Image (cartoon, grey):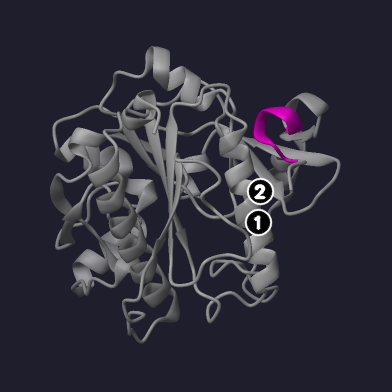
Amino acid sequence: MNPTNKTPSVVFLIPFAPRSVKTQWDTACAQLRQTLASIRNSTSGKFAVVVAGHEAPTFPVATDDRFHFRSLNHPLPEHPSRGVAVRLDKLAKISAAWEYAKANWKPKYVMKLDADDFVSSQLVGWLDSAGTAPGYLIKQGWIWRSEARWLIQRTETLDRICGSCLLIRSDLADQTGPFLTEVEGVVLGEANSNFAASDHYSLVPGSGISTLLSNDSHQRYAAQFAYLGHELPSLPFPAVVYRTSNVNSITRITAEARPKFKARMWLGKIRRLRLITPKLKSEFGLNAS
């Protein structure tokens, strides 16, 4: 192993759901391959990747010593809510991936990355030279309707909708606090549940204890850092493409449940549309296979 690969600027932790959860397994594997290709496209090679799952994808993950597939066999969590059960499984996979990463590398930062999203080729290099904060919230990014050929939507609020939005300095990743919420199966009283529904960004009274890394309440990340005494700055450039309309997503919205947008909201969405340029494709590896 190259000694420089022992101290990566960032390790990406990618939870990969099992075949029983993915309705289209071949598609899930193809999208994971695209996600890994976008990381491999980085201008700096100082990264590591751990994919954790019950089943390996249909292609080899470990193309070099920076990539590893962590095979797991824990029972899938049981919960009355399928969405909560899937999220608990996701967190178990992230924790297992992190344990492997800590045992094999000494990363500067850690990032949870969904198995169908894309990262900017500039991200790792920027962390090499400028990353010093306790963490970075990725608010600027892109929303891409899966397989759309021409248009992509710019966003300055990626953290509200996408879990692939946080870089944590590795020495803080295991610090604990009241971070788990109903999203991850915590049972709250009526008052605290009402608070959680009305305030999506603060810490929720009565939330369970978890680590900064092992929770899925991405809208509350700034409050979690503040609880630990740290300010969470935003990354100064768009760093993630969030794939939507994914047939395998557990959070996809049915036609009946789709929110009703007012004309002003539609106009705002249209104003944020951009052409998918060759430069954008190259930066995020959108045309990778």
Q: Position of residue 97 (x, y in %)?
A: 34, 54
For the magenta stretch, what is the residue range?
281-286
Question: Could you tell me which quadrant the N terminus lies in?
Answer: top left
Left or right of residue 110: residue 255: right
* Residue 34, label in figure: 2
Which residue is painted at 21% across and 65% down in the image?
192
Q: Image point 40% across, 28% down: which residue? A: 2
Quadrant of residue 122 in the image? top right
Image: 52 above or below 22: above
| Quadrant of the image occupied by residue 58 | bottom right
Q: Amino acid at mark 2?
A: Gln
Task: Point out which mark residue 31 bears.
Answer: 1
The spot of residue 157 in percent (x, y) is: 52, 38
User: Residue at the spot x=20%, y=71% of the render?
Assistant: 188
Q: Nearer the viewer, residue 202 or 84?
A: 84
Q: Is residue 66 left or right of residue 115?
A: left
Q: Residue at x 37, y 77 (%)?
A: 85
11 with respect to 270 (left or right): left
Determine whether 27 is above or below 286 in the image: below
In the image, residue 9 lies in the stretch drawn in magenta = no
Residue in front for this viewpoint, 155 or 276: 276
